[in-house]
Image (cartoon, helix red, strand yellow):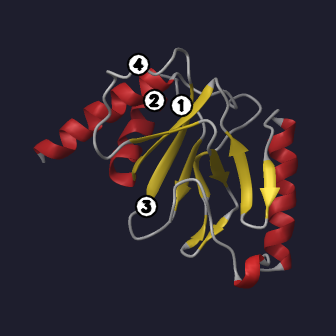
Amino acid sequence: MSLTTAETGTAGIPQNRGHARAIGEAVAGYRLLGWQVTVTEQGVFLPLGPATTALAMPARIGSRVLADLKSRMLAGPVTVIPGPREHWIFLAELVALLPTHLKAPPEVQFVRSPHRIALPPTMTRYGSLRWANPPSHSRHWFPPFTAVLALARQAAAEDQRR
């Protein structure tokens, strides 16, 4: 599965009415936060713009990055894409242009405009996306991508030493 798309049931039809209701409620909540989400047959998506990016990483690294961001009061919204190799998606603010010399660990991927990020409760073949750290009215901003990247580098290096 791609990090920026999701899959639905047969012929793109929503899985059930309960899921359709959950999508409607989620979209209303996202729009109250000021997010310009789109809804397709595949799910709910947040288009990335010139000032936003996302960093995708395996759960084993993502859980450490989120804990470190929380300890620094920098944690923003983080989604979880379920599957055999669960991935965490960190939404981040692009505070400067991404320098080409800026290296991410091989396990970490940048997702940039014009791509979009799937948001909960979008369904995949492994279940619904969920929040590891949900947005709220007091925490709907995105942390600087440099903070997320620095902590991902540290977590990946620690992971290699184990």
For label 1, the residue is: 75
Q: Residue at x 81, y 56 (%)?
A: 39
Is label 2 in a helix, a strand or a loop?
A: helix
Q: CA distance from mark 3 to mark 4?
A: 28 Å
Q: On screen, 88 above or below 128?
A: above
In the displayed orientation, state which residue is furthest to the bottom: 10
Q: On screen, 55 above or below 97?
A: below
For label 4, the residue is: 99
Left or right of 102 in this view: 1: right
Tell me residue 73's x, y (percent): 52, 23
For label 2, the residue is: 69
Q: Are marks 2 and 3 in contact (CB under 8 Å)?
A: no
Nearer mark to the viewer, of 2 and 3: 3
Tell me residue 18's x, y (percent): 83, 74
Q: CA distance from mark 2 to mark 3?
A: 20 Å
Q: Is 29 or 44 nearer to us in this picture?
A: 44
Q: Earlier in the sequence, mark 2 or mark 4?
A: 2
Left or right of 115 in this view: 161: left
Q: Earlier in the sequence, mark 3 or mark 4?
A: 3
Left or right of 76 in this view: 25: right
Disc number for residue 86: 3
Q: CA distance from mark 3 to mark 1?
A: 19 Å
Mark 4 belongs to which amino acid?
Answer: Pro
Res. 120 image quadrant: bottom right
Nearer mark to the viewer, of 3 and 4: 4
Q: Are marks 2 and 1 in contact (CB under 8 Å)?
A: yes
